[in-house]
C-alpha cells in the first residue's frame, strides 16, 4: 500500500529525530500507581493530567516524537474494568489528544506517534515478551483493527506498531493498518538477532520491505547491547530508516512485576546507531528524561 508523503517522512529524510523515553517510569516518578493490569492506560480515565505532564517532561528534555499512552489500551482491557465500547474508544482517542497538547508546548515541532502494542500487552502477564499466543494471523488482525481505527481517527502523525514479539503478529498488524491513511513504523522486541518468539530478525524485518506505508523499521524494548546489530540488519534488509529505542538494560520480572539488574543504556551509542541507518532514536522502559536530554544533545 502506498501512503502519500507526510511531513514526518519528509523530516526523517532530513535527519534523525529524537524519540521520548519510557512513559511508565516517568509516571512512577510523578507518584502514579501503575500496579493495575491496565498499567499506564488506567490513567487515561483516572488521571489524564498525569499523562500529559509525563509527555511534557520529555518535550522539555528535547524529544521530537511523543509515543502515546495507548500501548496497553484495548477494548477488551477496558471492558474488564466495566467500560463500554464508546467509553473505551474515547479513551483511545484521548491518548492522542494528551500527547498533542504536550507537543504544543515545544519550541520546535513535536510529532505524535500513536502506540499500538501487541496482543500480549492486553493479557498483562508478560506474553508480549514471548509471542506465540495460539492465535492465527486473522484472529490477531481482528483484535488489532478496531483500536487502530480509533487511534487513526484521532489524527496522530504516525502509528507505532511496537514491541512486536513475532513475525505472525507483525503480519496481522500490517494488515490491520491498511487503509487507515497514516504511515506506520514497525518495531520488534528482540534478543540477539531473533525476535522474542525466536524468529530471525532478518525474516521479521523483511515483512516491511516494499511496503510504502512503513516509514521505519527496527527494535524497541530490548537490551541496549542488542540494538547495534539490529539496526544494521534492519537497514540492510529493508533499505528503510531505522527506529531504535531500547530499554535501560534492567530486566523485567513478570512474576514479581519489578525490575532487576543495573542500567546499561549508553547515549553515546547514538553515533553508532545513526551511522548504521537509525533515524528515530530514543529509549523505552526505564529510560527517563535525563537520558533523552543526553540523546538530544548528541543528535542536536
Image: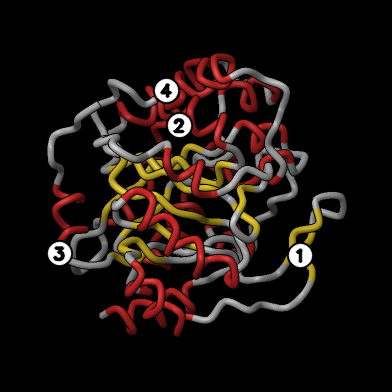
Between label 4 and label 1, give the one nearer the viewer: 4
Q: Which mark is residue 297?
A: none
Question: Do callouts 4 and 1 mark residues in contact (Cβ within 8 Å)?
Answer: no
Between label 2 and label 1, give the one nearer the viewer: 1
Label 2 belongs to which residue? 92
Label 1 belongs to which residue? 259
**Residue 69 in the figure: left or right of residue 175:** right
Looking at the image, residue 31 lies above or below residue 43: below
Residue 240 place in picture, x, y as percent: 29, 52
Residue 6 place in picture, x, y as percent: 15, 43
Q: Depth check: 31 or 12 in front?
A: 12
Residue 28 place in picture, x, y as percent: 64, 62
- Which element type, helix, strand or loop, lies under badge 2? helix
Q: What residue is drawn where x is 69% and y is 46%?
A: 129
Question: Do callouts 3 and 4 mark residues in contact (Cβ within 8 Å)?
Answer: no
Label 4 belongs to which residue? 176
Amino acid at each position: 500500500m502506498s501512503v502519500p508523503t507526510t511531513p514526518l517522512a519528509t523530516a526523517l529524510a532530513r535527519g534523525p529525530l529524537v524519540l521520548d523515553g519510557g512513559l511508565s517510569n516517568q509516571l512512577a516518578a510523578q507518584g502514579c500507581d501503575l500496579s493495575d493490569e491496565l498499567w499506564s492506560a488506567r490513567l487515561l480515565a483516572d488521571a489524564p493530567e498525569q499523562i500529559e505532564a509525563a509527555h511534557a517532561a520529555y518535550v522539555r528534555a528535547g524529544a521530537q516524537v511523543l509515543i502515546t499512552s495507548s500501548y496497553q489500551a484495548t477494548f477488551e482491557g477496558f471492558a474488564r474494568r466495566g467500560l463500554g465500547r464508546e467509553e473505551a474508544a474515547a479513551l483511545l482517542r484521548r491518548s492522542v489528544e494528551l500527547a498533542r497538547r504536550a507537543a504544543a508546548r515545544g519550541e520546535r515541532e513535536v510529532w505524535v506517534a500513536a502506540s499500538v502494542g501487541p496482543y500480549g500487552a492486553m493479557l498483562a502477564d508478560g506474553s508480549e515478551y514471548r509471542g506465540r499466543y495460539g492465535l492465527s494471523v486473522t484472529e490477531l488482525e481482528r483484535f488489532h483493527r478496531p483500536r487502530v481505527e480509533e487511534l487513526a481517527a484521532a489524527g496522530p502523525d504516525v502509528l507505532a506498531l511496537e514491541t512486536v514479539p513475532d513475525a505472525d503478529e507483525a503480519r496481522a498488524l500490517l494488515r490491520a493498518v491498511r487503509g487507515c491513511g497514516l504511515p506506520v513504523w514497525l518495531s520488534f522486541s528482540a534478543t540477539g538477532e531473533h525476535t522474542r518468539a525466536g524468529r530471525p530478525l532478518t525474516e521479521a524485518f523483511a515483512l516491511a520491505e516494499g511496503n510504502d506505508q512503513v516509514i521505519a523499521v527496527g527494535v524497541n524494548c530490548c537490551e541496549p547491547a542488542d540494538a547495534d546489530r539490529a539496526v544494521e540488519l534492519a537497514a540492510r534488509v529493508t533499505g528503510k530508516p531505522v527506529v531504535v529505542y531500547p530499554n535501560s538494560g534492567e530486566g523485567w520480572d513478570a512474576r514479581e512485576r519489578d525490575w532487576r539488574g543495573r542500567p546499561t543504556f549508553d547515549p553515546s551509542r547514538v553515533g553508532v546507531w545513526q551511522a548504521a541507518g537509525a533515524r528515530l532514536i530514543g529509549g523505552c522502559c526505564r529510560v527517563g528524561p535525563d537520558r533523552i536530554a543526553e540523546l538530544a544533545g548528541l543528535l542536536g
